[in-house]
Image (cartoon, helix red, strand yellow):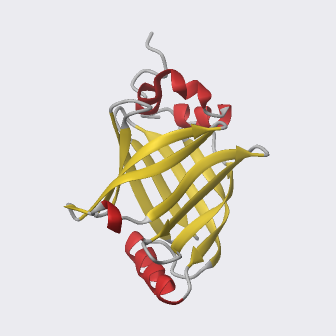
C-alpha cells in the first residue's frame, strides 16, 4: 500500500528538512486543510498607498486597509501546491506553487494571475520563510533592482498559524501587506478526497 506522503510535492521538495518545520506546518502541508481568522490589511501612505490600492485591486484583495476576515483553503496535487484565499467572502486571491529542484538550493514558482515569482525557502525556528529571487509580470522578467522587497512567512504561535505578507517597492515604504493569526477550521484533506 502506498504511503499517504507519496506524490506530495512539498515533502518531496523538502526531503529530510521537512522534519525541521513545526509539526502543525508539517500536518497542514502533508494533508491540506482550511484556515480562518481575522487579518489586518495594510496600505502605504501617499504614493505608496495609491500603488498598494492598485496592486490590491489587481490581485483581487480588498482595497481598504483594516480588519478583514480571511479563509485559506490549502491543498496539493501530484505536482503543485494550491492556496486559495478568500477575504470577507467576496475577494479571491488564488495562487499555485510549483517546485523546482529541492531544498535548500531549489525554489518554488508562485503563479498569481499574470505574476510569477521565484521563491526560495528558509526554515527558521520551525517557520517557513519565503525569499523572492525572481519575478515576471505577463511573461516579462523584472530586473532585480526593480523587484519589490518582500516579507512572507508562516509560523506557529500559541497553536495558531501566524503569517505575514508584505511588499515595498524601491524607494517606497511598504505599499501593501496583510497578516494575522488563523485557526484550522476543517480536518485535513487528502488529495482527491
Q: Position of residue 59 (x, y in %)?
A: 40, 70
Would you say 15 lies left or right of 101 here? right
Residue 105 occupies quadrant: top left
Find residue 182 and report its image quarter: bottom right
Q: Is residue 193 above or below residue 1?
A: below
> Picture coordinates of residue 134 (x, y %)?
33, 54
Observer able to see residue 89:
no
Of residues 155 and 171, the one drawn nearer to the viewer in this rendering: 171
Instruction: Residue 129: give x, y in percent of width and height.
Output: 54, 46
Residue at coordinates 45% horizontally, 77% vertically from top-left? 171
Quadrant assignment for the N terminus: top left
Residue reaching furthest to the bottom: 46
Query: Quick check: 50 left or right of 99?
Result: right
**Residue furthest out toward the left:** 139
Q: How many marks?
A: 0
Camera sees residue 81? yes
Q: Residue at x 79, y 46 (%)?
A: 158
Q: Residue furthest right?
A: 158
Return the residue nearer the eye: 114 or 177: 177
The quarter of the displayed image where residue 104 is located: top left
> Residue farthest to the top?
1
- Answer with left or right where residue 67 lies relative to residue 4: right
Q: Which of these two is toward me, 122 or 27?
A: 122
The residue shown at (60%, 58%) is 164
| Left or right, 15 with reference to 34 | left
Residue at 66 percent of width and 31 percent of height: 23
- Where 115 sits versus 35, above or below? below
Q: Measured along the vertical axis of the image, is residue 63 above or below residue 180? A: below
Amino acid at each position: 500500500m502506498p504511503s499517504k506522503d507519496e506524490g506530495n510535492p512539498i515533502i518531496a521538495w523538502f526531503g529530510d528538512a521537512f522534519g525541521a518545520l513545526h509539526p502543525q506546518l508539517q500536518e497542514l502541508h502533508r494533508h491540506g486543510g482550511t484556515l480562518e481568522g481575522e487579518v489586518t490589511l495594510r496600505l502605504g501612505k501617499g504614493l505608496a498607498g495609491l500603488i498598494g490600492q492598485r496592486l490590491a485591486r489587481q490581485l483581487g484583495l480588498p482595497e481598504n486597509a483594516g480588519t478583514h476576515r480571511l479563509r485559506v483553503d490549502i491543498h496539493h496535487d501530484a505536482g503543485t501546491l494550491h492556496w486559495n484565499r478568500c477575504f470577507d467572502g467576496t475577494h479571491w486571491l488564488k495562487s499555485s506553487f510549483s517546485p523546482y529542484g529541492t531544498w535548500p538550493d531549489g525554489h518554488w514558482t508562485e503563479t498569481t494571475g499574470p505574476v510569477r515569482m521565484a521563491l526560495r525557502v528558509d526554515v527558521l525556528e520551525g517557520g517557513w520563510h519565503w525569499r523572492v529571487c525572481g519575478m515576471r509580470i505577463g511573461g516579462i522578467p523584472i530586473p532585480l533592482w526593480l523587484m519589490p522587497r518582500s516579507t512572507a512567512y508562516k509560523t506557529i504561535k500559541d497553536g495558531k498559524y501566524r503569517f505575514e505578507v508584505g511588499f515595498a517597492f524601491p524607494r517606497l515604504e511598504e505599499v501593501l501587506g496583510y497578516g494575522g493569526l488563523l485557526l484550522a477550521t476543517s480536518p485535513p484533506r487528502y488529495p482527491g478526497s
